[in-house]
């Protein structure tokens, strides 16, 4: 009989399965029908295709898998899988019994805000959108601009900025359009289940990538984010962030306090935070790995494979990090952007991808595709990830590659023709 451990893996991408395979563990993968890949069909010891976001579907499947195969851990490293995985871990007695409670308030931004306020930790003014009048009331209380966001979606989907009282009809119309439906950009695996209002948080934005080991939080990296006041798309990330030591300490200290307060004890986390005029304020956080190439940036800059730690730690197959790592270089991601219109030609991607200082380069559009006005992450056209000795050099290189080496020709949108008056 084999002594190999067995993991029940809920969702995820090929890289997640690769790390478990490298550990020599038996992988029982429950994957969503929309996300199955050829690699997963080959590499998983057992592949079960089901909508794991539906508890009534996934529970009996997981119980049967456990009874047949034996399971030492239930793990998910992807956003839609963290709640069902933590709930199953609690159900099977493989965790401390509180993981689902913690995961729910990490994913539900309203639960998170209420919990932090009860602990006395910094939070913006926040309230649920109940009706059109609630927008007026919140604007009078919190001031303008303020942010309206879905309670539990991801990647900037559905975020709105209310500029002034005259803007609230537009915001309310969009809330009504989205509420109760499925996300329709990038992934359809999330349901829009209500909206939250928050006062605007000023200041530069960062994310803090951490690994937690039995309640001890180790910050692996602080990521500098390139954002804009005009939309909610993330335009790029840089690791290590260019920060004074004192500001870095303020950010990491705030995130460690946040994770402890939220009850996070094990695994990776990705916390978005602003260094505001009132001090560090957490925007939102996730009990999973950062997306948008952040794990690749961290590994390139620090030599830490956060996916591997996220896979090995729940099975007891890795020692915890003793201390935060020291950067050995820098890595940057920049989004590929163009003005709205119709794509007529794409070139240069293969040449950029073949460079030794480029980790990844991809473009998602082809001739004939439409370039939409930039609203959130799903409107970006691609990305480049590049490395260099330091962050300044990596930023300069990556921005040049995106701007000059990757060519996307776009026929601009035709200007509307004025109506003729008889």
Image: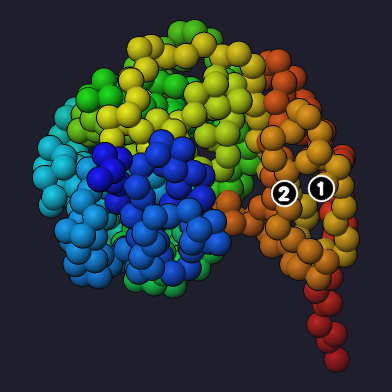
Residue 104 seen by the camera:
no
Location of residue 369 by image quarter: bottom right
Specify the farthest residue to the bottom.
422
Q: Quadrant of the C terminus?
A: bottom right
Spot the residue most to the front.
Answer: 1
Q: Secondary structure at mark 2?
A: strand
Write the residue at 33% across / 20% down.
319
The residue located at (39%, 55%) in the rendering is: 45
Quadrant for residue 115, please give it. Answer: top left
Q: Which residue is disc 2 drawn over? A: 362
- The reply to whether discs 1 and 2 touch (Cβ–Cβ < 8 Å) is yes
At 17% from the left and 30% from the top, the residue drawn is: 119
According to the image, label 1 marks what residue? 349
Q: Which mark is residue 65?
A: none
**Residue 344 screen position, x and y as percent:** 87, 64
Q: Position of residue 404 (x, y in %)?
A: 87, 40
194 vs 240: above or below: below
List x then y, in percent, for residue 248. 46, 15
The residue that appears at 73% across and 53% down in the rendered structure is 363
């Amino acid at each position: 009989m084999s002594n190999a451990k067995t993991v029940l893996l809920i969702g995820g991408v090929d890289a997640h399965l690769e790390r478990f395979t490298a550990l020599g563990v038996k992988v029982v993968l429950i994957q969503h029908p929309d996300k199955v890949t050829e690699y997963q069909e080959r590499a998983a010891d057992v592949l079960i295709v089901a909508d794991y976001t539906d508890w009534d579907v996934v529970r009996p499947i997981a119980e049967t898998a456990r009874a047949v195969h034996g399971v030492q851990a239930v793990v998910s490293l992807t956003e839609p899988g963290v709640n069902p995985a933590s709930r199953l871990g609690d159900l099977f007695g493989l965790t401390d019994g509180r993981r689902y409670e913690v995961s729910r308030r990490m994913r539900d931004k309203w639960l998170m805000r209420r919990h932090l306020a009860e602990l006395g930790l910094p939070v913006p003014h926040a309230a649920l959108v109940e009706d059109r009048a609630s927008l007026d009331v919140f604007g009078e209380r919190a001031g303008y601009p303020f942010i309206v966001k879905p309670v539990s979606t991801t990647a900037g989907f559905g975020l709105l900025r209310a500029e002034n009282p005259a803007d609230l009809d537009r915001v309310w119309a969009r809330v009504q359009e989205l509420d109760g439906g499925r996300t329709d950009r990038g992934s359809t695996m999330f349901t829009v289940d209500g909206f939250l209002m928050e006062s605007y948080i000023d200041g530069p934005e960062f994310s803090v990538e951490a690994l937690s080991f039995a309640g001890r939080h180790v910050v692996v990296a602080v990521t500098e984010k390139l954002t804009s006041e005009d939309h909610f798309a993330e335009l790029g990330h840089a690791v290590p962030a260019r920060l004074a030591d004192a500001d870095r300490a303020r950010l990491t200290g705030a995130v460690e306090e946040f994770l402890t307060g939220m009850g996070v004890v094990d695994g990776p986390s990705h916390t978005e935070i602003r260094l505001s005029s009132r001090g560090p304020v957490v925007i939102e956080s996730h009990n999973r790995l950062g997306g948008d190439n952040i794990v690749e940036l961290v590994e390139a800059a620090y030599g830490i494979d956060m996916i591997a730690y996220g896979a090995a730690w729940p099975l007891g197959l890795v020692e915890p990090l003793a201390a935060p790592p020291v950067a050995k270089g820098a890595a940057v991601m920049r989004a590929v952007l163009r003005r709205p219109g119709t794509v007529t030609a794409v070139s240069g991607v293969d040449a950029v991808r073949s460079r030794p200082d480029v980790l990844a380069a991809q473009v998602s559009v082809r001739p004939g595709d439409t370039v939409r006005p930039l609203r959130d992450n799903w409107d970006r056209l691609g990305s480049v990830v590049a490395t260099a000795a330091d962050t300044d050099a990596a930023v300069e290189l990556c921005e040049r590659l995106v701007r000059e080496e990757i060519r996307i020709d776009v026929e601009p949108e035709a200007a509307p023709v004025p109506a003729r008056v008889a």
